[in-house]
Image: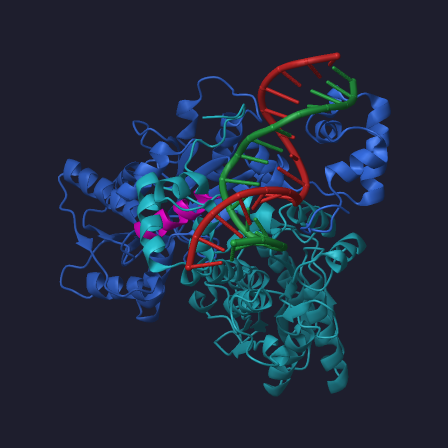
Chain colours: A cyan, B blue, C green, D red
Amino acid sequence: MSGKRKGLGRATVHDVAKLAGVSSITVSRYFKQPEIVSEALRDRIAEAVAALDYLPNHAAGGLASTRGRVVAMVIPNISGPIFANTIQSFSDELNQHGYQLLLASSYFSMEKEESAVRAFLGWSPAALVLTSQYHSEGTERLIAKAAMPVVETWDYVPERKPVQVGFSHVEVGRQSVEYLHGKGYKRIAYVQNSLIGDLSALDRRDGYISRMNEYGLEPWVFVPTQADPFEAGRQAVNSLLLRQRPAEAIVFANDNLAAGGMLAGLRAGKRFPEDCAIFGFGNYAFSEMLLPSLTTIRSPAREIGEVAALRVLQALGEVPADGPVQHLNLLDCELIARESA
Amino acid sequence: MSGKRKGLGRATVHDVAKLAGVSSITVSRYFKQPEIVSEALRDRIAEAVAALDYLPNHAAGGLASTRGRVVAMVIPNISGPIFANTIQSFSDELNQHGYQLLLASSYFSMEKEESAVRAFLGWSPAALVLTSQYHSEGTERLIAKAAMPVVETWDYVPERKPVQVGFSHVEVGRQSVEYLHGKGYKRIAYVQNSLIGDLSALDRRDGYISRMNEYGLEPWVFVPTQADPFEAGRQAVNSLLLRQRPAEAIVFANDNLAAGGMLAGLRAGKRFPEDCAIFGFGNYAFSEMLLPSLTTIRSPAREIGEVAALRVLQALGEVPADGPVQHLNLLDCELIARESA
DNA sequence: TTGTAGGCGTTATCAC
DNA sequence: GTGATAACGCCTACAA
């Protein structure tokens, strides 16, 4: 009606206030702390809101309060079997408390992660959630200065400053060896992820190596060159089984590699676990459907999202803190013994 | 320095402007249209930006311009093999143009979708992206009034008002029948998705029915009661194969069902496709790894995200429109003939 | 090419 | 419990 600029064309707090015969700040309070507004006014405001189809403008609210109701998350990828469950549960939990999720993918690139963090900070998110403990120096600097809670997921290194919600990848690597050693296997190989940048997978490999050494067994790491995980698995099986002293058991960096390797072996006439035991990581959806079904370690993907959301909401005061819960951020990985090993 | 309220504590355009000895609007222009700022000023501003570690505040920008650089997307789910690729490619494309993705899940519930849309509108997103053509009346009303581009994905019904980017589910159902009929199968059953709310899957079923009728074959639809897709598939196979005149071929509403069904059959001693042909939908990651590998129809998940992003960016004037491309929004589904049928 | 004035819609602060 | 005022940080409109 007045100014020289046109807004959204939507009703504002002022419109609601005018119609309800109150001041705009009362309308604002009606939404944020209804209990401190008298019932009479509440009813009048509710009517006006309905009549005008009023929707609060969160951009304006975030600007005024310097704390938007968005939480930003950078994750290696959205598709792919690994992180989707984390995103899903994290997002659902936040939505229930009126927060929205801003999402970007890093594809395991620290540079991409840093630029995503930089872009996100411009939204003044209420909190920032990253994946793993490994970041560029620039990212470290940004999160050190960031005036908001920061949570790191999919890793657990409690000595770091940001809150950690995840598990120990080194321990996962060790568990695989322990299981296979317990079954009597000696020549146990490890197939690395061909995807460089997935540094957590290297932690699992390191766990494998250390436990092998402790058993007095010789570590045997195969590094595929194929980018496609199924191809990489095939490449590994071809190399590790078609030799004079083939591997007795193979630990793969993830279930995709394991499935690709096992399939290639089956088509080549190998039998699992008779000719070689196969051990994966991740418990992807298909892993129990393979023939033989895949022995693997289930990662707590969904739980990571839930707990991370809880920690964020606690840090924001949306949810009461439940005491000293630091250690509850270390989540369990479940070894699932199936047919392949 | 001045006010009675504290902001983010970060540098603002004004700080940059002061340090660079220009006005704040020039700094603003430096970011939005650098080419109209003289090179001398550009250098001074760049220096000041670096010195102050300035990050633009997008909430403020969105408020002032009434058009934030966020795009909101409501999708049935993030995890699950279907939509992740769409989200991934959509998000990547947007990020490249400086837009951020706001994401929420509807779980195939129209109520959840509507409340997500309502929440999103408060962010004044630059565009709104939904899934399928089926929405609540409330959602229809909201998007009809919304002052922003709306794109519907995973469906193609050009007569609708919003831009459609997807494919014809009816056609997919018909194709399955055509393929199996061409292979000589007559008693072809269809296994519906146990997930109610997935209305597009019912379109595929309708396509199956219409094509069966055209061939003079009797449609045979099985509706599982198990919620878990693998269990539902098992239930279907048990019912359809363990009877006097078992099905010769089964079309499953998606690859999860198909895999669950096939696995259950294999474990029960059935052989595929000798005893029964198996046909899926979706071409999930595991489908080619099964033994036998799964004949299915690949959905253009990734392309949907790409094209949807392109249409959004075109509607926002970020990317030049490439002529009358309406029909290019109808994407192809590829039938992938493998071993199971 | 650059600057001035003021508003975008909300909320923090202070006063009643 | 309610209201007046100004500020959050940026950008549109207009002027020079």
Q: Quadrant of the N terminus of chain A?
A: top left
The x, y position of residue A253, in whole percent, is 64, 66
Q: How many marks?
A: 0
Question: Which residue is depicted at the point 66% across and 69% down?
Answer: A163
User: Foreground: A4 or B252?
Assistant: A4
| Magenta span contains residue B118 | yes
Please tell me whether residue B47 is drawn above or below residue A166 in the rendered image. above
| Magenta span contains residue A105 | no
Snapshot quadrant of residue A223: bottom right
Q: Quadrant of the C terminus of chain A?
A: bottom right
User: Foreground: B225 or A253?
Assistant: B225
Q: Which residues are magenta?
A: B108-123
Please tell me whether residue A102 is drawn above or below residue B67 in the rendered image. below
User: Foreground: A217 or B79?
Assistant: B79
Determine the main secondary structure of the stretch shown in magenta: helix
User: Foreground: A183 or B25?
Assistant: B25
Residue B215 showing in the rendered view? yes
Q: Is B266 placed left or right of B235 in the picture?
A: right
Question: Which residue is depicted at the point 19% across and 43% down?
Answer: B209
Q: Is B215 placed left or right of C5 in the picture?
A: left
Question: Which residue is depicted at the point 58% across and 27% down?
Answer: B318
Snapshot quadrant of residue A33: bottom left
Residue B334 showing in the rendered view? no
The x, y position of residue A252, in whole percent, is 62, 67
The x, y position of residue A300, in whole percent, is 54, 71
The x, y position of residue A329, in whole percent, is 60, 75
